[in-house]
Amino acid sequence: MDGAEHSPQADGQQAPVPTTKRVLLLAIKAGEIMLSSGAEIYRVEDAVTRICQACDIPYVESYATPSGIFLSLGQDDATSEMGTIVKRVRRSGTDLEKVSRVNDFIKSFCAGELSIDEAYGVLEEIDRTPQFTLPVRVGAIVLVALFFTLLNRGGFVDGACSIIAGTSAYLLTQVIERLKINRFISIFTSCFCGTLIAVLLFVAGLGDSLSAIIIGTITIYLPGVAITNAARDLLSGDLISGVARVAESMLIAVAIAGGVGVMLGLVPVLPRADVAAALPPPVLFCAAFFGTVGISLIVNIPRRYLLPAALIASCGWVLSRVVVSLGHSPILACFAAACLVALLAEIATHTTNKTATLFIIPAIFPLVPGIGLYNTMLNLIRGDLQMAAESGSMALFMAGGIAVALLVVISMTRLVVVVRNHILRRS
């Protein structure tokens, strides 16, 4: 560490902790909170490095993966000892409020406003920050189920059925998570039970579009966060983490499709065919807006950014509909809409001085091809492999279009910032 170990005091007091070790623990604590709250890998590594450099540590090496952080600190002198710590992060979830607060904390710490001990206390407080209460989150599920059903050509009765099925599935997820069961099993089970309730309501004569009801039920499980983080990690050169995030999103999709598909496979014959609703564009715009508010509550973004995120999502969804109405493919529509979402998110970032993740993650949910995933499973169950391949490949390319759009816009934005800073330094 930084010199010889301190010996215990004569009066029996505990020896003081060496400074390097205290910095290690502080930086790892910040990285752990961010990683377990859904932050991108490059952001975690940058946060850890900045904390160490703010403590005048000359040598800092940090490396993070989706499940752990490695950090080494030391002096420039080759004869000095190195401090190294490895932290396994087993918690996983999405809590953008914590990500935002840790970012604000790092700015304050790097400005010299906090001592190491005070900083650790602040991180402990951030780590204890609760999410929205269960009643608020259940209200968010109601918004998501109702309005995403409307976005997927369902009617208001279909939306009411989605509320019942989606709320039941979410409450089951909370119970399973308390039992610390594997996340993918949790998603599979919740989607299976949500689809079961949706089918029962449809068979009972409620609702006109079973597909819309099911899509509204499973929307909260779609891998929008994994897709976003995968794109941003790949952009930053973190190939291992980016590929891991891609694999995570694929496993989530398989768990969702498996839960829905197994349930539908148990239903011999449905009493009637789906009937799509024709809602006016203003209603659909409001559906995208309020559905994104629900998603934002679930991922726990700071309250004052709920409306900006919802507006960005609504603008992106409108553009996607316009592109489709002009006769272009849904893949191009997803790409164009995701470009707009990423651009507006970057503008909001520079306006609010917050991370773009706060706005991108909830705003892309209306674009995630949930109906393509559903149709793929339905065609597989029916034995129509050609239609299953077509709908599955379309959903895959739409998701890829979203990821590529994020990569393009974010990289172009960074290039503009670098060029601007270079010009300002030379002027």
Image: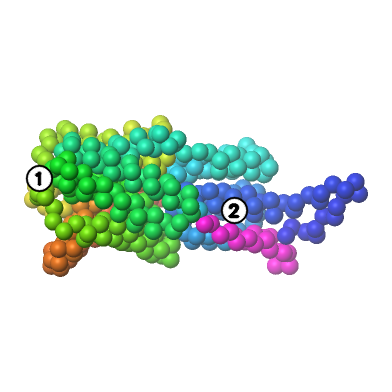
Q: Secondary structure at mark 2?
A: helix
Q: In the rendered view, does 379 fall on the left or right side of 399?
A: left
Q: Is residue 218 above or below residue 3?
A: above
Is the C terminus in the top left, top right, bottom left or bottom right quadrant?
A: top left
Q: Position of residue 366 (x, y in %)?
A: 25, 45
The amino acid type of the residue labelled 1 equals Val
Observer able to see residue 391: no
Marker disc for residue 77: none
Amino acid type at mark 2: Ile
Q: Magenta segment range?
A: 71-90
> Is the residue marked by circle 2 packed among few (<14), some (14-19), or many (20+) residues within 10 Å?
many
Q: Which residue is mark 2?
A: 28
Label disc, if present, on residue 275 of the rendered structure: 1
Whole-percent x and y of residue 375?
A: 18, 57
Number of numbered discs present?
A: 2
**Crowd rating for badge 1 (residues with CA inside 10 Å; few <14, some 14–19, many 20+):** some
